[in-house]
Image (cartoon, rainbow, N blue to C red):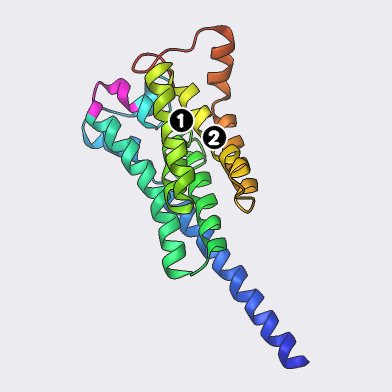
Amino acid sequence: MIVALARRFATTLKMSRDLLLAIAIGYLLGSIPFGLILTRLAGKGDVRAIGSGNIGATNVLRTGSKVLAALTLILDAAKGAAAVWIARQYLGDDLAAVAAAAGALIGHLYPVWLKFRGGKGVATLFGILILLWFTGGIIYAVVWLGLLATIRISSVAGIGAALSAPIAALVLGVQTLFPILLGFALLVVWKHRDNIARLRAGTEGRLGRDSG
């Protein structure tokens, strides 16, 4: 009896340690501000001083460099995917992968290095989904690119894509991921609250111009 309890306690302790490690790894990866780093390295100054002040690809596009914007989008997605991959590869279970995903998204949205003023999470959430639930990632990409191509408002495309993840999980019966994907979507929507206010006022700009 005592031995069984000790083993159970040790297992629980290891699981808790692994989850904390996964969150920490995810946060550190997610908090890398690629948009800020790339624009500074390219001599474009501080991307936070232009446009919406956001560090994401849409605002990087305002520097006039499509290449830097594309690189920012790719790297922001890659860091989310990397967090999930590392957790699965070295911590060995889906719970750790979800914990790393949460850490990565929160790290991107609220990086300690930038006084918790980060990006809006659309690209990072896409990277997370591709590794966490590939089908959901494809649906996310279709919604995101479809809205960008038709409506051409970055914020609408990002919000629509984020909301598609929990909806897809619910419709396709992936109940285990629904709560965390709903939480992720709500975080992305919250980070777009200024955009939503501009959408309601009819002042939100279209892609490549004033959208943030």
Q: Which residue in the protein does label 1 denote?
A: 143
Q: Residue furthest front?
A: 172
For disc 2, the neighbor class at 10 Å (few under 14, some 14 to 19, many from 20) is many
Q: Amino acid at mark 1?
A: Val
The image position of residue 79, as x and y in percent, is 38, 49
Q: Residue furthest top?
A: 202
Q: Residue at x 43, y 30 (%)?
A: 144
Is 82 or 60 nearer to us in this picture? 82
Q: Real-space Cα distance between discs 1 and 2?
A: 7 Å
172 relative to 210 in the view: left or right: right
Q: Main secondary structure of the magenta part?
A: helix
In this view, 58 is above or below 94: above
Task: Spot the residue most to the right.
Answer: 1
Q: Is residue 60 visible?
A: yes
Residues at discs 1 and 2 in contact (Cβ within 8 Å): yes
The quadrant of the image that shows the C terminus is top left
Residue 74 % position (x, y): 32, 40
User: Is 181 part of what is drawn in magenta?
Assistant: no
Q: Residue at x 37, y 18 (%)?
A: 207
The stretch of residues the image draws in magenta is 60-66
Residue 83, quarter of picture: bottom left
